[in-house]
Amino acid sequence: MGSSGGGPAEGRGSGRAGGRGRASGEWARHWRYAELPGLDLLRARYVRHAFPRHSHEGFVLAAVSGGIEEVGLPDGTLRAGHGSVVMINPEVPHTARAGTDDGWTYSTLYPSAGLIAEIAAETSALRGTPGFTESAVEDPYTSRLIQEVHRAAEAGNALAADSMLRIAVSRLLRRYGGPLPARTPRAAGAAGAARAREILEERLTDPPSLDQLAAQLGTSPFALLRAFKRAYGMPPHAWLTDARVRRARRLLDRGTTPAEAAVAVGFTDQPHLNRHFTRIVGVPPGAYRRERESS
């Protein structure tokens, strides 16, 4: 892949992405390998694509092998180049885009919190909920390990893929690991923001307006907007879109068609799902579902 020498696998990924054209030079493959439970994989080259602010239920471990990835995090923007590893903990809002006109190429692992905890319990002395204290590091060796997980999985070599995965994660935990802070926001309006989130989860397909939501909580729209963004890193409407895409992913994982998933999560139609899903996940929902069916 990219500067790390993918070749045929790049072409396969590009074709399966079903919408990343040759003109843009973009390609992507988002998939699962049945022998690695608790893990999603993404290999991609993006040039014009930009990920809007979103978050993940699990972890993000990305090995950049070409170009520059620019990642926007709550505490600032970082730039990761060849040999870098980007580490993002669960539920941390972030954006991603190309940091150079040539885009960026990377191999990403999305391990579940349970998988990280399992490896941490076996290989580290970390206490509490394990996570990462650094967001990006120059670590060419671990970057290559992450890329090797992808290569082994694509070759159907379960032993090598699982071994490389555990070696890479244990190395990252040993060098950059630490306990995640407890999620107990005490800022003004935190309780209202949490209740607003619960309401939006309950009314995913029929959400109230900001004014209606604020009135239900006994606050003003702007106060709620500020408190929600402070608590979750994005305004309620962006959080709602992210939550809808997450639920759509779970439905697609179970074999639901994109058209059915769009209606089920509250999008107006499939084109709306296609647009938001592709922006947040990095591949269209149809390509995402086909990979699930073939894995």
Image: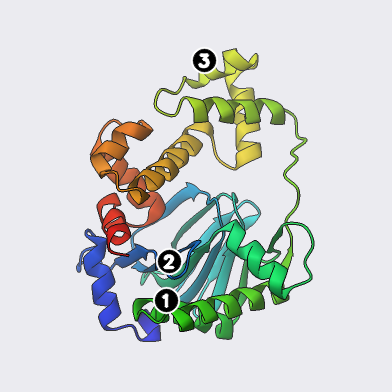
Residue 163, image x and y in percent?
54, 81
Of the numbered discs in the image, which one, if any, rests on residue 41? 2
The crowd level at tag 3 (other Cα within 10 Å; few <14, some 14-19, many 20+) is: few
Question: For this view, does 192 lie left or right of residue 284?
Answer: right
Q: Do the residues labelled 2 and 1 touch (CB within 8 Å)?
A: yes
Q: In which quarter of the image is residue 134?
A: bottom right
Q: At numbered mark 2, what does the secondary structure look like: helix, strand or loop?
A: strand
The crowd level at tag 2 (other Cα within 10 Å; few <14, some 14-19, many 20+) is: many
Mark 2 / mark 3, whichever is N-terminal: 2
Q: At numbered mark 1, what does the secondary structure look like: helix, strand or loop?
A: helix
How far apart in space, not on screen, are marks 1 and 3 (Cα)?
47 Å
Residue 166, image x and y in percent?
58, 76
Q: Is residue 173 above or below residue 266?
A: below
The kind of residue tagged 2 is Leu
The residue at the point 46 percent across, 42 percent down is 242
Q: Do the residues labelled 2 and 3 touch (CB within 8 Å)?
A: no
Of the numbered discs in the image, which one, if any, rests on residue 150? 1
Mark 1 / mark 3, whichever is N-terminal: 1
The residue at the point 52 percent across, 16 percent down is 211
Q: Is residue 145 visible?
A: yes
Q: At numbered mark 3, what does the secondary structure look like: helix, strand or loop?
A: helix
Q: Are marks 1 and 3 in contact (CB under 8 Å)?
A: no
How far apart in space, not on screen, are marks 2 and 1 (Cα)?
7 Å
Q: In which quarter of the image is residue 258?
A: top left
The residue at the point 43 percent across, 70 percent down is 35
In which quadrant of the rendered image does the N terminus lie? bottom left
The kind of residue tagged 1 is His
The residue at the point 45 percent across, 23 percent down is 207
The kind of residue tagged 3 is Gln
Mark 2 / mark 1, whichever is N-terminal: 2
In which quadrant of the rendered image does the C terminus lie? bottom left
Of the numbered discs in the image, which one, if any, rests on residue 212? 3
